[in-house]
Image (cartoon, helix red, strand yellow):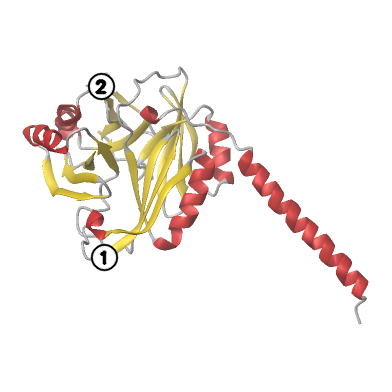
Amino acid sequence: MRNPGSVFLLALLLGGAIAASGASARQTVASSPDVAVAPQYDTTHVYVAPEDFDRFTDSFVATFGGHKSKQGVFQVTPTPSQTMSQLVFTPVGTVSVFGFKTPVPYPFGIERTGYLVTDLDAAVKSAREHGADVTVAPFPDPIGRDAIIEWPGGVHMQLYWHTQAPHYDALQTVPENRVYVSPGRADALVRDFTAFAHGKVVSDDRHAPGLEIGRPNETYRRIRIESKFGKVTVLATDGHLPYPFGREMTGYEVASLADTLQKAKAAGVQVLVQPFTSDQREAAVVQFPGGYIAEIHARVR
């Protein structure tokens, strides 16, 4: 028969070890580096055919205002490739545009955004510690270094660092990274990403109007996150989504939806989802020349 005193001592030791482990995990999260810079450096990655490149960038500027960086052809992957590349700066968000002249090496093209970080190695280490998988290890590009990581739910994003720190104008409104995941992975994604980004959950609506995802007679879960990286909206659904919902990677906030859509249409942009009102915003979904799909919204007072 086991000595009751030994059992009690073992329980104390195990309890202490578990408590120490929990404290260590909390300390790791609390001491993780804040590697974000600012929302204007969160760029949506847009892949278009070379023949659609200028049509897309022209229509994007015509819709939102702003200007373009100098266009060039570069190798931006760790294996041989060539792509047209250009940044488009607007008051409501920045996009990195790629028009590959060669086949696109895997897994490039599945990353939705690029986040500028202060230290790439520290950012990759922190992402790993917070549950992300590193799908493309850090590699040099013409102006710095990059890596691609994957969060729970299959959310891929690029982390990047520049040899010379870039200086972009602050945004008038911060766009939202719109992430569709299954209900079973939403909590893990939110927990891991907010810890990595030093962010906070600003709302978690488990009965958001299904109108927002093309299912007006139902509800779904919508979680909004804010951090120094910018805004993320997590849409937890069963994947039964009518087109084009789930294809829009970014939501852009504008002063007037009607005025913006008028400019967009004049620039050859197609309205896929007509304006609707929900969650104190009026929204629509559009497709730009070249295929890029985006949500555009304005606050309703």
Residue 125: image location, x then y, percent: 58, 39
Is 260 located above or below residue 1 in the figure?
above
Q: Which mark is residue 218?
A: 1
Name the amino acid type tagged 2: Gln
Circles 1, 2 touching at the beta carbon (< 8 Å): no
Q: CA distance from mark 1 to mark 2?
A: 45 Å
| Residue 26, horizontal then vertical, whole percent | 65, 47
Instruction: Return the disc, 1 or 2, that comes first in the chain's sequence.
Output: 2
To which residue does mark 2 refer?
Answer: 71
Instruction: Please identify the residue farthest to the bottom as the structure is shown.
Output: 1
| Residue located farthest toward the front when viewing the structure as drawn | 301
Amino acid carrying label 1: it is: Glu
Number of residues whose C-alpha sits closer than 10 Å to that of mark 2, classed few (under 14), some (14–19) or many (20 or more): few
Compared with 98, 248 (above or below) is below
Provide the secondary structure element on which disc 2 rests: loop
**On-image quarter of the C terminus:** top left
